[in-house]
Image (cartoon, rainbow, N blue to C red):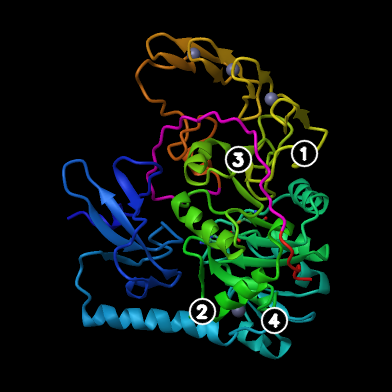
Amino acid sequence: MKDLSEESTVYQYGSGYGVEAVMNCPIPEEDIPYCSHGPTVLFERFFKDRESRKFFACSASRNRKECTFFQWFDDKLTPGKKLIQKEIKKQIFIKGKKKAVKVVIEGDFWCYECSSGFSSENKHIHKDHETKLLTRNDLKCPTQFLNPSESKKAKAQYFFDEPTCNFFLTSIKRLQFKNVICIGTPRLFELVRAADISTILLDLDSRYEYFYSSEEFFLYNLYTHFFFDKGSIEKAFKNLVSKCTPEETLIILDPPFGGLLTLLEKTLSKIWSLFNEETVPTMMVFPYFLENHVCQNLPSLLMHDYKVSYSNHLTYRNVKHGRGSPVRIYTNISGDKLSLPKEDYKFCKTCQRYVYKENRHCQECNVCTSKDGRTYIHCKECTKCVKPGSVHCPTCKSCKPSNHKCGVLSTAGCHICGESDHKRRDCPKKIAENEELSMKLKIKRKSIATEDNRRKKKKKSVK
Ligand code: SAH
Ligand code: ZN
Ligand code: ZN
Ligand code: ZN
Ligand code: ZN
């Protein structure tokens, strides 16, 4: 018989047949089973001809090779399973209780095989391993030498390249943020920290415990807003937040692109509510072709034209030719404030935001309509702007590539995101290989007119 649980790792954006997260889990929080990534998430699998079925699975990884936890919702908890649960929780809570690792100092070593730091007296333990002597500079910039794929817990690590790092840092300084909460952005964290701006890092990658103190680094799962302990670390985080003025704080996150936005929405709402605000200045990094999903789940975050590029991603570096990276910034910071580098961007007075230099303000649509950076063309039949090179097809009643076959879904592009400019294996951050996402993306055009709703509150900043 086919292993249904294997099949259940399939996620799907939007509705339809596939798997969706159940937002209102009917059982109390303390009864939710844990995997090594913290509390699991209740999912529901829909079938064409059968009743749907619910199950618990890992919140952080959809790749069953990375996290093997699986449990049907209606499965009886056998004594064996209860024991396993007890053990998993014990492991997690031990980790949080006493800091298991010592922060490395200059002259210590890093072991690539064990993914850990050690001092010279423990050299014999790593005798045949690939190791590195840690210089003073290494301690400040671990993302420069840590292997991006070395982490077992969070596979997809793509670090921002220098121009993107600089863009973020310049924006932080210009907008005068005093505190920066980095979620899944370890390289940016390094840079902000070096610039002497008060900042913390929340990330699932425990290797950073070797480089930062418990006041700076929080082992964290962004899909469940889970800190790896019974509550004292979360308390420390809350305490820190309580000293931040919301309008002087920026939250920056670069979540895996395959992750569920319904879960991210919950997480961000939780963090924002700690500030007693509906929203706090936030920048989320996500591809432009998932804009309609962000719109649905996080309507306060609007997409901007800035092309976020990575140093170690072949497809999403900003190369001279071609369209460059499809990754963008979604933010609730108003468009007129988020100024983009003059070399490649211009200000549109009507839209009140900076746009890519080739983005044309369409009189009919009354917005700057380009999403991928190319100049879009208005189609009277579709009553919207379309990608250049497409022609209006009367049979399909929409604009299609000139070589398309009527009624046939294009198989040339990426099965994961539906884009035609790359194959599934090049999809942003390589969404887990064994999933079968198929989606048709209709990108809702939305005016990027933003409102500035920062309310002044007098609180002290962290520093
Ligand atoms: N562009 C960023 C790095 C993004 S890589 C930069 O240059 O700073 C994605 C990051 O998210 C990794 O550091 C990874 O460890 C982290 N991550 C992945 N899944 C996560 C999860 N469920 N919770 C928290 N962090 C996660
Ligand atoms: Zn070793
Ligand atoms: Zn415009
Ligand atoms: Zn138009
Ligand atoms: Zn058309």
For numbered disc 2, what is the local secondary structure? loop
Residue 54 x %, y %: 26, 58
Disc 2 marks a residue whose amino acid type is: Gly
- For label 4, the residue is 103
In space, the residues marked 1 and 4 are separated at their CA atoms by 37 Å
Is 455 in the magenta? Answer: yes
Instruction: Identify the residue shown where x is 39% and y is 79%.
Output: 88
Residue sitting nearer the eye, 398 or 68: 398
Q: Which mark is residue 302?
A: 3
Instruction: Identify the residue shown where x is 46% and y is 61%.
Output: 60
Q: Which range of residues does the magenta coloring cover?
A: 429-456
Q: Quadrant of residue 78?
A: bottom left
Q: Is residue 266 left or right of residue 32?
A: right
Instruction: Identify the residue shown where x is 42% and y is 61%.
Output: 59
In space, the residues marked 3 and 1 are separated at their CA atoms by 15 Å
Is 364 in the magenta? Answer: no
Residue 146 x %, y %: 67, 65
For numbered disc 4, what is the local secondary structure? loop
Residue 401 in sight from this viewpoint: yes
Quadrant in which the C terminus appears = bottom right
Main secondary-structure element of the magenta-colored stretch: loop
- The verdict on label 1 being within 8 Å of ligand 3 is no
For numbered disc 3, what is the local secondary structure? strand
Disc 3 marks a residue whose amino acid type is: Leu
Q: Is residue 241 left or right of residue 108?
A: left
- For label 1, the residue is 340
Q: How many residues crowd around disc 4 within 10 Å: few (fewer than 14), some, or many (20 or more)?
A: some
- For label 2, the residue is 231
| Label pair 3/1, CB-CB below 8 angstroms | no
For numbered disc 1, what is the local secondary structure? loop
Earlier-in-chain disc, 1 versus 4 = 4
